[in-house]
Image (spheres, grey):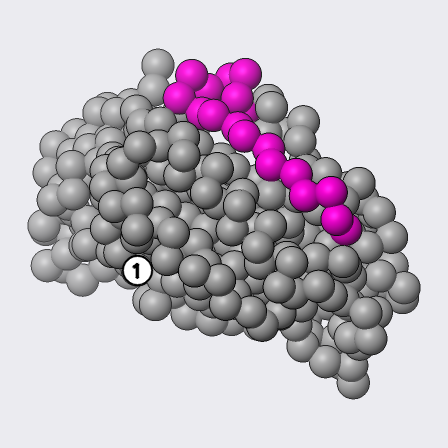
Amino acid sequence: MGKRVTLLPAGSQFVVEGQETVLEAAIRSGVALPYACSNGNCGQCKARIIEGEVQRARHQDYVFSLADRQQGFVLLCANSAISDLVLEVPDVDGAEEITEQKFRVKVRKLERISDQLLILHTRMPRGERMRFLAGQYATLSIPRIGDYDYSLASCPCDEKRLEFHIRYVGHEPVSDYLFNTLRVGERLALIGPKGRFVLHEDSLRPMIMIAFDTGFAAIKSLLEHATAQEKEREIYLYWISCGSEGQYLDNLCRSWQDALDEFHYIPLSISESHQEIMAQQAKGCEITKQKLLRVVDQHSDLSGFDVYIAAPEPFLESAQKIFLKFGLDPARLRAETVHGNQNVSCLVG
Ligand code: FES
């Protein structure tokens, strides 16, 4: 039977199963804790035991001071729970407190959705993990070609396998390379994590999540993290897709809807292709505005919601105006420019 862990002063709870460490259980459950190395070296994950007992599950090199030992500090990455626990931990880190690092990731799989859309699966080097928060992004760096930012589409609960959704941007060297030259097994330089498009961790409000095209990458990461938290709240996902590609992970969204009572998936489609939308900027903005009005139509008052939207820059501006007009508290709106996407310039109100 799992052991329940309660964190003070935040009061958040999760369950440690079997031999997993307390840190592994927290990450799997979507509970943010301070940590860095995950292997008993840095001391970042230390916490004080208020109640309960732990058992050493991993080797640790970090050495506690006598005072720390006397106060009952342990490393959460090196210990499992053998009873229910009450732990005192420092306040949860924000995105700005996670240090950017450079890694050499290996290409695990290239999943071609179409000749314009690619899902890139990578694996971290042996013994390394990239700590990040759901919704953040990273820079892929190709020597002598260039750098480009892409949202991390994977859940922070899997720090070894990272996923990116890549839209082809014509005449842009990095996307040319990723679509035409990159091969499975090749190594890429990755710098991250970056960005502040993260969940309101302490919120129990219902959530509206809006993804435009590959904006789904960041939204997918947020959703996987939010659903792992097992908080009882309604989640509405609106995914605006372009052209014949549709919602390219539609089956995944439908499986979430089947499995989760409070999850609602509403696909919205634009008949024009992504290229056409980007080429005809004013038309693209107007179409997007109409889709956003359909979103707010379904919710008479937005004042009780948290809203997250990932879309090209001008569409974000449009969304902000619409959502605020329908009662959303500006502090509850988090917006992210779609990374690795072509920017367009238009203003719609
Ligand atoms: S995370 Fe570094 S010691 Fe636990």
Snapshot quadrant of residue 49: top left
Q: Is residue 27 magenta?
A: no
Q: How many marks?
A: 1
Identified at 66% across, 38% down, the residue is 269
User: Residue 175, image x and y in percent?
Assistant: 78, 67
Q: Please identify the quarter of the rendering in which residue 204 is found.
A: top left
174 vs 329, nearest the viewer? 329
Q: Answer with left or right where residue 315 lies relative to residue 243.
A: left
Secondary structure found at label 1: loop
Q: Amino acid at mark 1?
A: Gly
Whether label 1 lies within 8 Å of ligand 1 gets the answer no
Which of 87/67 is in front? 87
Q: Residue furthest bottom?
A: 144
| Quadrant, the C terminus | bottom left
Highlighted range, magenta: 256-273
**Residue at left 39%, top 62%?**
196
User: How far across and how far down the image is residue 347, in percent?
Assistant: 50, 67
Local crowd size for mark 1, using a 10 Å CA cut-off: few (<14), some (14–19), many (≥20): few
State the residue position of label 1. Answer: 94
Q: x%, y% of residue 294?
A: 48, 37
Image quarter for residue 300?
top left
Which residue sits at x=52%, y=59%?
315
**Residue 88 visible in the shown view:** yes
Please tell me which residue is depicted at 76% across the width and 58% down the height of the picture.
276
Q: Nearer the viewer, residue 334 or 30?
A: 334
Q: Quadrant of the N terminus?
A: top left
**Residue 337 visible here:** no
Q: Is residue 21 above or below residue 139?
A: above
**204 relative to 333, above or below:** above
Residue 187 x, y percent position in the rendering = 76, 65
Is 139 in front, or is 254? Answer: 254
